[in-house]
Image: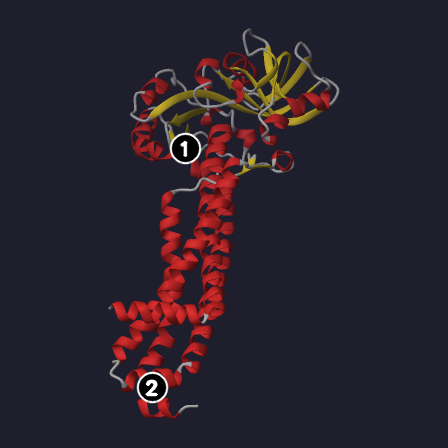
Amino acid sequence: MSLLFTTARRNLARHRRRTIVNALSVGTTTAILVFFMGYYRGSYEELLFDTIIRYQTAHIQVQRPNFSEADPDSWASPSNLISGWETLPGRIRSVPGVTGAAPRLLLSGYAGDGRDKLPVISVGILPDAERKVSVVLDSIVRGTGLTSPGTVLVGDSFAALFGMEPGSRCSVMTRTSYGAPNAQDFAVAGVFRTGYAALDRSTILLSLADAQALADSGDAVNKVFVMCSSAAAAGAAFPAVFDSAWKSGAEAKPWTVYARSLIEHSETETFFYYIFLGMIFALSVSTIANTMYVSVFERTREIGVMRAVGWRRRELFFLFMLEAATIGAIGAAVGLVVGGAASFLLRAFPIDVRSMAGSVDMPFFEIKSTPHWTDFALSSLAGIACAMAAGTSPARRAARMDVVKALAAR
């Protein structure tokens, strides 16, 4: 065995340029893989998904079975209202893993300064409960919260369009639960800035009592937003939350239902990344295989001599595979250093894309990386496997070479 290692080391050192090219090929594959895994975990799993949960969907939403997000005109209709909901949030909060449950009354309509208006979603809330499921009330940049009746909170993009400041008049229009138009003037209590365009431009917050009066819905709500300690905890808590909702004539849906388009976008992007990685992997395998075939051809006479002095086919096969594994290990080490450095650099200095967030309806604030030790383990194994896969065929060819023809080669 020591002879195999010594011979492999000498062969790699003798063909140093070829060894470096092969190692760099493996290193490129490893570096891209380790960087991508940290990038995906940081920018998607931890940032994008977590942000849309905190800013838009919560982990679970409770609503009537026929409630349709695509039909905002029907949100306040009697068939979509949850009556006798008062004990529901308490039952949900008692479920292990749940950290908050807040009732909401969502109303579709318009808001403006009395002269001009924009389509908005007016959301009736209980401020103390709302803080447990959303970050909006912690994002107020001017004014105060909903401390008194007849007041609203508006996003800074909306406020800028109408020149609104705390104390300004804001006219909110919607349909009542029976379809009649209704409008009411409110005073702007505060202006919030979340950085998420869909909230800052087209969401109005008002007290639950004011929203119920505006919609003539009595004491009913049409949503209960539920937050959990984590997405995994939400999955474990979902059956119990669904059971509590069912007892109130409602149903529960996980956040993935409301963020389906975003999830599909991430899956599509990930699919193309894997295609790219597959192409890099195939190119690396092809490069290493070609150079090792050249090595076998150049060492034909040498292989014949080795067979003549007693080397067996199996030993020759192991020799070339050992050379491939060594190239893979060197390349993987280089790739881990380069890819790991890039991943940690992106973690320390994330790329701020808030300017882009203002033009797309998704809370995509930063591009960052969250490296994990499993990324390095899996990427190094992939790099070594890449070299081993490339070396298998040349190794077999060397092992099967005819001794007489090899010795006769020039």
23 sits left or right of 144 in the view: left
Vertical comparison of 112 with 150: above or below: below
Residue 65's mark? 1
Q: Amino acid at mark 1?
A: Pro
Name the foreground residue: 242 vs 144: 144
Can you give x and y, in whole percent of width and height, for residue 268 in the image?
Answer: 50, 51
Q: Is residue 310 visible?
A: yes
Quadrant of the image occupied by residue 140: top right
Neighbours of disc 1 within 10 Å: few (<14), some (14-19), many (20+): some
User: Residue 114 versus residue 264: which sits nearer the camera?
Assistant: 264
Q: Residue at x 56, y 30 (%)?
A: 73
Say which quadrant the C terminus sits in: bottom left
Q: Could you say whether the residue bearing mark 1 is in a helix, strand or loop?
A: loop
Q: Which mark is residue 304?
A: 2
- Residue occupying image coordinates x 46% and y 33%: 50
The numbered mark, 2 or 1, whose residue comes first in the sequence reads 1
**Color style of the picture:** secondary structure
Left or right, 213 with respect to 224, comes to right
Q: Amino acid at mark 2?
A: Gly
Image position, residue 19 (x, y; %): 45, 67
Viewer-nearest of discs 2 and 1:
2
Image location of residue 241, percent across then percent down? 33, 28
Question: Would you call the spot at circle 2 few (<14 residues within 10 Å), some (14-19), or many (20 or more)?
Answer: many
Q: Residue at x 37, y 22 (%)?
A: 99
Q: Residue at x 44, y 81 (%)?
A: 298
Please indicate whether residue 210 sits to the left or right of residue 303 in the image. Answer: right
The disc label shown at residue 15, or none? none
Q: CA distance from mark 2 to mark 1?
A: 78 Å
The one of 163 and 298 positioned closer to us in this rendering:
298
Number of numbered tags placed on the structure image: 2
